Amino acid sequence: MGRKLRVAVLFGGRSSEHEVSLASAKTVMGGLDPARYEVRPIRIDREGRWLLEDSGSKTAGLLPFRGLESRRGDGSSRRSLLAVDVVFPVLHGPMGEDGTVQGLLEVARIPYVGCGVLASAVGMDKDVAKRLALQAGVPVLPHILLRSPGELSGKRALLRGMKVPVFVKPGCLGSSVGVRKVKDFSELGAAVRYAFRFDTKVIVEQGVDGQEICCAVLGKPGDLETSVCGEVVVTGGHEFFDYSAKYTDKAGHELLIPARLAHEESRFIRGLSERVFEAFDGNGMARVDFFMDRRSRRAFFGEINTIPGFTDQSLYPALFQESGLTIPKILDRLIALALERSRRRGALRTSRR
């Protein structure tokens, strides 16, 4: 059997989803089998410092950046403070889920769990994600992109094609941070200015009277497993599935598993989820969200989450648990996929010889 695999769980981060990351990391670390893995918790604080969160270790505290030294040509690790076999990023939002940390780990030649640089970056950007989904033949809702609050007045003509409610969203955030539902266009300017407090790009998207459907994906292109479809029903007086309904208000939503879909509709959504995952060049895990129009029964791509939440209220683990996969089994599979990808990439030539 050999020694235990050393897994660095990377969490926290400088984004507005810092607290969600802490909760997700707690679940991940609790789900890693101690007989198989040696867990090294590494927290990135709000100032961007990397901290080794192991009170029993002599190296606990500030983690020098040199801990991320690259591997030798033969694949073995150099001596370093980190010295892990694989990194498990549990970072939500910018500077963690958007390809930045993935790029750092690629350069350092350290295996890591989840999607690579491309899928992470594209999945985080709602504008680019919608364009890619459309190219893959997956419908999206009408929307406009704003790069500054001042652009709003110049795009009034485009807004005339929309009906309230519309949703105003930061372009590169998750967990509904900075999102507002606009039920009267007189409220639009304030909602746009609010969203720009969180990002440099803002999306104004047509609302739809529909079911919020989600599907979890696990694996790699050509070898994918999809969960049953789930349906989010917002409760507790929330206007939509906002941050509070997702994480802080335990009565804020209900997750119906399986979703209230006909068999053919469920199979169709699962097929769309695979199509999106492969179009984004996904690897490891993702949760793909859709809106299903109640009248037309058309499904519209919402977004792809390449590091979905792993909290006790999160959708991704709940969907797969209904499909028979426990959290420890999900984590085992994700780590195996990370190591397999690293081996394949490590075997590629780096010169023409």
Image (cartoon, rainbow, N blue to C red):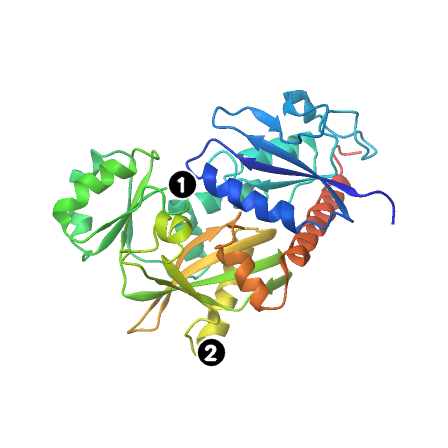
* Quadrant including the C terminus: top right
Q: Which of the pair 181/36 is nearer the observer?
A: 36
Residue type at mark 2: give it: Glu
Q: Is residue 132 left or right of residue 62?
A: left
What residue would you read off at disc 1?
172
At x 63%, y 31%, the residue is 53
At x 52%, y 36%, the residue is 96
* Residue that lies at the very extreme toward the right in this rendered image: 2
Residue type at mark 1: give it: Cys
* Residue that lies at the very extreme toward the front in this rendered image: 56
**Residue 117 rendering spot, x and y as whole percentages:** 56, 40
At x 77%, y 43%, the residue is 5
Q: Is residue 93 visible?
A: no
Q: Which of the pair 204/5 is nearer the observer?
A: 5
**Residue 38 rendering spot, x and y as whole percentages:** 74, 41
The numbered dot on residue 264 is 2
Q: Which of the pair 322/103 is nearer the observer?
A: 322
Query: How far apart are labels 2 and 1 at the CA level?
Result: 33 Å
Determine whether the residue tagged by mark 2 lies in a helix, strand or loop: helix
User: Vertically, is 239 above or below 177?
Assistant: below
* Residue contact at pointers 2 and 1, CB within 8 angstroms: no
Crowdedness of circle 1 by 10 Å Cα count: few (<14), some, many (20+)?
A: many
Residue 7, located in which quarter of the rendered image? top right
**Residue 134 rendering spot, x and y as whole percentages:** 41, 56
Q: Earlier in the sequence, mark 2 or mark 1?
A: 1
At x 34%, y 50%, the residue is 242
Q: Is residue 172 left or right of residue 343?
A: left
Q: Is residue 52 left or right of residue 351?
A: left
- Disc tally is 2
